[in-house]
Amino acid sequence: MTPAAYVHLDLDAVRHNLAQVKRYAPNNKIMAVIKANAYGHGITRVARALDQADGFAVARVDEGVKLRKAGIGQAITVLQGFVCTDELLLMLEHGLDAVIHTPQQIDILQQRGADVAALSVWLKMDTGMNRLGFKGVDFNAAHERLSACAIVKQPINLITHFANADDLLDDKTLHQIDLFNETIQGYPGQRSIANSAGILGWPNVSIATRESAGDWVRPGLMLYGCSPFAGKTGADFGLRPVMSLHSRLIAVKNVAAGETVGYSGTWQCQTDTRLGVISIGYGDGYHRHTQSGAPVLVNGQRVPLIGRVSMDMITVDLNSQPNAQPGDPVTLWGDGLPVEEIARHADTIPYTLLCGITQRVRIVEARH
Ligand SMILES: *Cc1c(COP(=O)(O)O)cnc(C)c1O
């Protein structure tokens, strides 16, 4: 019998997707981004599967510590760095590399004379995202201050982040690249610019010509098989989905024309409807805002979602499948149904759906 609400993880796919990153960025080192529990796929599991990655990036210190405790040996960069001395000490203890993005972090580093050349850093430039990082002359001043910190390993590495790289018509990305390269001219150290959208969408400008061999790309979403570009799927770039979300039908019944289905009666049956009830809901991470009409695979065939998503269940129109029975297998996204497509029907992006799988969903791993 098909189990209720489970995620199937294809770890060969994540390795395949890493190989695709190498094809798009053959001269670069790869910092695989596995923050947020590897976009919902399991941070330790994904780090182990990506043993060919040159390094990893996480958002927060505790994510890096978890990886070290699991025996992961590659460089691990903490994208938010530390916010206090205690966190810095934790990073030193576990050999984590810090992104330095704000003057208070440099104050903390200056106060520590003891550990000489103990911390590898990436100095972050704000090239227009207006989130983390130093702008303009503040960046140069921060570089000077960091260069004088005994605790900091030299040379200082240099990093920035794209704001709009998923929009191929927006030349902001080119401005960001130019600003970064102009500002860091003459500085030694490794450089890192491109996320998935930069790698896939701006390969000629961001990597081949601008980032020199040996510098780092930072793919996240594409490792999990998804496209960062609206209207495209991972398959368009030779990527394979890693996560598939599955469940099963638990009831099948007839509802007369004119009746409504589910909370608030948002769906009214236009014809007599063979209704299927599936054991999946927002309590599992199936987005509540997924609209009626979103495709669901029942026995491998597409049927439309109808009515509101509830916590533990959704309802579908089974008129095209008169023989469907409780227990029949259901796919919500993944194999044969791109999560990018479901994200569109839920007015969100694939990132949030992947990250949103909840604790109660069983994980089934597979390697072929
Ligand atoms: C999350 C993140 C990435 C990866 O972005 P994707 O769009 O998932 O490829 C890269 N760099 C930074 C700084 C990030 O925060």
Image: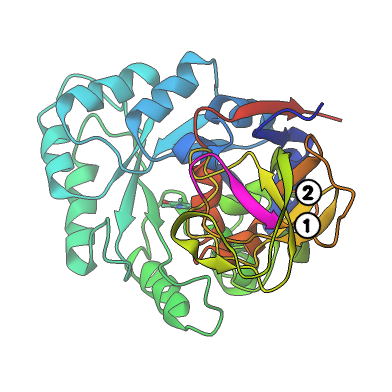
Q: Which residue is mark 2?
A: 335
| Sequence-first tag of 2 and 1 | 1
Q: Helix, strand, or loop for circle 2? A: loop
Magenta run includes residue 311 = yes
Compared with 325, 126 (above or below) is: below
Measured as percent of width and height from the top left, residue 61 is found at: 34, 30
Quadrant of the image containing the N terminus: top right
User: Label 2 is placed on what type of residue?
Assistant: Asp
Q: In the drawing, does residue 223 fall left or right of residue 353?
A: right
Q: Helix, strand, or loop for circle 1? A: loop
User: Label 1 is placed on what type of residue?
Assistant: Leu
Q: In the drawing, does residue 220 fall left or right of residue 278?
A: left
Is label 2 or label 1 in front? 1
Measured as percent of width and height from the top left, residue 24 is found at: 71, 60
Instruction: State the separation of the CA atoms marked 2 and 1.
Output: 20 Å
Q: Which residue is mark 1?
A: 318
Mark 1 Cα shell of 10 Å, populated few (<14), some (14-19), many (≥20): many
Disc 2, ligand 1: is the CB inside 8 Å? no
Residue interval drawn in magenta: 310-316
Please indicate, yes or no, whether residue 296 appears anywhere in the rendered image: yes
Say which residue appears at 19% left-offset and 41% top-offset. Answer: 148
Say which residue appears at 85% left-offset and 62% top-offset. Answer: 320
